[in-house]
């Protein structure tokens, strides 16, 4: 039996849902920037609500707590990194190109420059409150990066004990570049995030990774 034409309220559901999604994105954008600037402890939900011109109860309609909001921020920015590393691992050692992966990660961090600062804040604070959450999101990144190193064609030059340290060094090359951008601009006057500087750094990293993991594993430097 026909139920009749949709009511006004029913017709408005997609528009309301879309409006809610846009509001959630605005909240995530604001929270990401504030967490990156002040860290988890230095950011309150009131700060976030004020940034997006919302009342606290309205913010709770989208995120149940500060912890839930922080987890959503991490998921949004770290998820794509995990996807890139996962794709490399799925390719296998014969087809994987670590230099290309680093280049893709750099491009991703260019889109999400707050991610390195988020992780850096957590490292400085010791992660005492959020260690389980950070382990949930960051540990897979290191794990997949280690798999990436071990799967590369030039991995034979590194001992199993060296692999985690090598991954840590690559992490610092990537994260440190974005974290140090403001300081470098003050000291040197150069904007590390400008297209020319970013292109130079990406090319440098590609050269470093190609040297560390030569296509011909018999090549040494």
Image: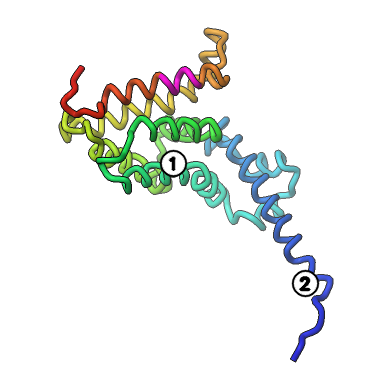
Mark carried by residue 81:
1
Of residues 36 and 213, the one drawn nearer to the viewer in this rendering: 213
Reply yes or no: does residue 191 show up in magenta.
Answer: no
Q: Is residue 63 above or below residue 154?
A: below
Q: Label 1: how many residues lie within 10 Å, few (<14), some (14-19) or many (20+)?
A: many
Q: Quick one: label 1 or label 2, which is nearer the N terminus?
A: 2
Mark carried by residue 166:
none
Percent x, y for residue 175? 43, 28
Percent x, y for residue 150? 23, 38
Q: Is residue 191 above or below residue 140?
A: above
Percent x, y for residue 57? 70, 54
Magenta stretch, main secondary structure, is: helix
Tell me which corner region of the image, top left, top right, bottom left or bottom right, holds residue 189: top right
Quadrant occupied by the N terminus: bottom right
The residue located at (31%, 39%) in the rendering is 96
Q: Label 2: how many residues lie within 10 Å, few (<14), some (14-19) or many (20+)?
A: few
The residue located at (19%, 22%) in the rendering is 219
The residue located at (44%, 34%) in the rendering is 105
Q: Which residue is mark 2?
A: 10
Q: Mark 1 to mark 2: distance in Å?
A: 39 Å
The residue located at (61%, 41%) in the rendering is 31
Reply yes or no: does residue 202 show up in magenta.
Answer: yes
Of residues 83 and 73, the one drawn nearer to the viewer in this rendering: 83
Of residues 178 and 42, the one drawn nearer to the viewer in this rendering: 178
Quadrant occupied by the C terminus: top left
Residue extending furthest toward the top: 188
Residue extending furthest toward the bottom: 1
Percent x, y for residue 165? 26, 29
Provide the secondary structure element on which disc 2 rests.
Answer: helix
Q: Is residue 79 left or right of residue 221?
A: right
Provide the secondary structure element on which disc 1 rests.
Answer: helix
User: Magenta stretch?
Assistant: 199-203
């Amino acid at each position: 039996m026909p139920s009749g034409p949709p009511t006004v309220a029913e017709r408005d559901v997609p528009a309301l849902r879309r409006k809610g999604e846009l509001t959630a994105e605005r909240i995530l954008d604001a929270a990401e920037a504030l967490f990156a600037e002040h860290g988890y402890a230095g950011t309150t939900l009131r700060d976030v609500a004020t940034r997006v011109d919302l009342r606290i109860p309205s913010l709770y309609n989208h995120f149940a707590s500060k912890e839930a909001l922080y987890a959503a921020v991490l998921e949004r920015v770290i998820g794509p990194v995990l996807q890139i590393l996962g794709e490399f691992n799925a390719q296998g050692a014969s087809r994987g190109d670590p230099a290309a992966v680093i280049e893709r990660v750099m491009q991703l961090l260019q889109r999400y420059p707050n991610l390195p600062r988020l992780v850096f804040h957590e490292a400085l604070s010791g992660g005492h409150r959020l260690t389980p959450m950070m382990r949930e999101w960051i540990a897979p990144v290191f794990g997949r990066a280690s798999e990436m190193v071990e799967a590369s064609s030039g991995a034979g030059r590194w001992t199993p004990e060296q692999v985690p340290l090598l991954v840590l060094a690559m992490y610092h090359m990537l994260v440190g570049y974005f974290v140090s951008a403001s300081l470098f601009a003050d000291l040197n006057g150069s904007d590390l995030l400008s297209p020319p500087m970013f292109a130079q750094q990406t090319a440098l990293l590609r050269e470093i990774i190609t040297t560390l993991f030569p296509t011909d594993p018999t090549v040494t430097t």
